[in-house]
Amino acid sequence: MNFDRHRRMRRTAFMRDMVRETRVTKEDFIYPIFVVEADDVRKEVPSMKGVFQVSLNLLEEELEEVSRLGIKSVIFFGIPNEKDPEGTGAYHDHGVVQEACRISKRLHPDILVILDTCLCEYTDHGHCGLIDSETKDVDNDSTLPLLVQTAVSQAGAGADIIAPSNMMDGFVSEIRKGLDDNGFSHIPIMSYGIKYASKFYGPFRDAADSTPSFGDRRTYQMDPANRLEAQRELESDLEEGCDMMIVKPALSYLDIIRDVRNNSNVPVVAYNVSGEYSMTRTAIDMGLLDEEVIMEQMVSMKRAGADMIITYFAKDLCRMIDEGME
Ligand code: PBG
């Protein structure tokens, strides 16, 4: 008989393990935490079962669990007490994520802290920058200094990595310069430079209370139909000095993850976004899918070329790994 015997290497579990090409470990996960400035809140996000908004004064418990499960890094998103048109809460030295970072570093210096540099959680209009009063669009160049100020205050609070997600042009070079000028040349930038204008962010905007009050984000986030445009964003960010590149969302954009892997030599991060989480969570909770699909999704992102994954499933995944699942 004249054909290949592919099944030879699938015959036993030992053999399958040996030839496995992709592995998921706890080191791959970055866990997002929604931190509330007001006291005594621990509230499940209605559109994201299993994900909670947690007050600064209750953060200790949350971090305890994260640490116990073996999660190595977290990214904080803030829900401030007050919002204004300029998003001043984002660059306040004692803003909510700056304080979350200080608490985390004090209690668990071993947990790596990433802070998201954007204004949308802090502006009363919900956009990622300053609004031009004439065009009613986000103004790129006047927003940049505020993002720099935000990044510098985040690094000052002890953040290990700065992750700008605002999609203004030039944010990587401006933030790099701002960090360097303020004594933070050792702090890496993880750029969300490839961020699509996606409907998969819906539940996050519930959780972070950051839905735009008018319009949408299509003048700064990318059109989901474009692949070459991602290549142009990647080239700019590399030239401007980004250290790591995020692709967001992840599961419907695995081709983009693969492109970034093939066309750069920086670590690639997949952002497994809120809508992806909620879809999968709901299907599992309804008994339509087995919980193991979560791991299959992680394997798929890594197989596509991701080195790290920002995921709301990090806790579940650590439990699954502890129970022996690969
Ligand atoms: C913006 C930001 C967003 C997400 C992470 N950072 C939302 C947006 O662009 O509307 C979305 C993450 C998710 O959906 O899980 N600061």
Image (spheres, grey):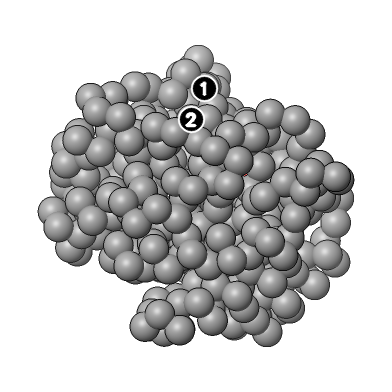
Q: Quadrant of residue 154 in the image? A: bottom left
SS for dot 1: loop
Horizontal and vertical percent for residue 47?
52, 22
> Mark 2 sits on what residue?
207
Height in image: 223 above or below 82? below
Horizontal and vertical percent for residue 287?
49, 17
Ligand 1 has an atom within 8 Å of the beta carbon of the residue at disc 1: no
Mark 2, residues whose alpha carbon is within 10 Å: few (<14), some, or many (≥20)? many
Query: In the figure, is residue 288 to the left or right of 71?
Result: right
Q: Farthest left residue?
A: 107
* Nearest the eye: 171 or 142: 142
Which one is closest to the eye, mark 2 or mark 1?
Answer: 2
> Mark 1 sits on what residue?
47
Query: In the figure, is residue 256 to the left or right of 136?
Result: left
Q: Quadrant of residue 127 in the image? A: top right
Horizontal and vertical percent for residue 71?
28, 52
Regarding residue 228, the answer to whether it shows in the image is yes
- Badges 2 and 1: C-beta atoms under 8 Å apart? yes
Give the residue displayed 60% in from the left and 41% down from the top.
85
Ligand 1 has an atom within 8 Å of the beta carbon of the residue at disc 2: yes
Give the residue displayed 20% in from the left and 59% down from the top.
105
Regarding residue 21, the answer to whether it shows in the image is no
Give the residue displayed 58% in from the left and 47% down from the top.
86
Number of dots carrying numbers: 2
Mark 1, residues whose alpha carbon is within 10 Å: few (<14), some, or many (≥20)? some
* Nearest the eye: 20 or 150: 150
Give the residue displayed 77% in from the left and 48% down from the top.
132
Height in image: 251 above or below 19? above
Q: Quadrant of residue 229 in the image? A: bottom right
Height in image: 209 above or below 31? above
Kind of residue at disc 2: Ala
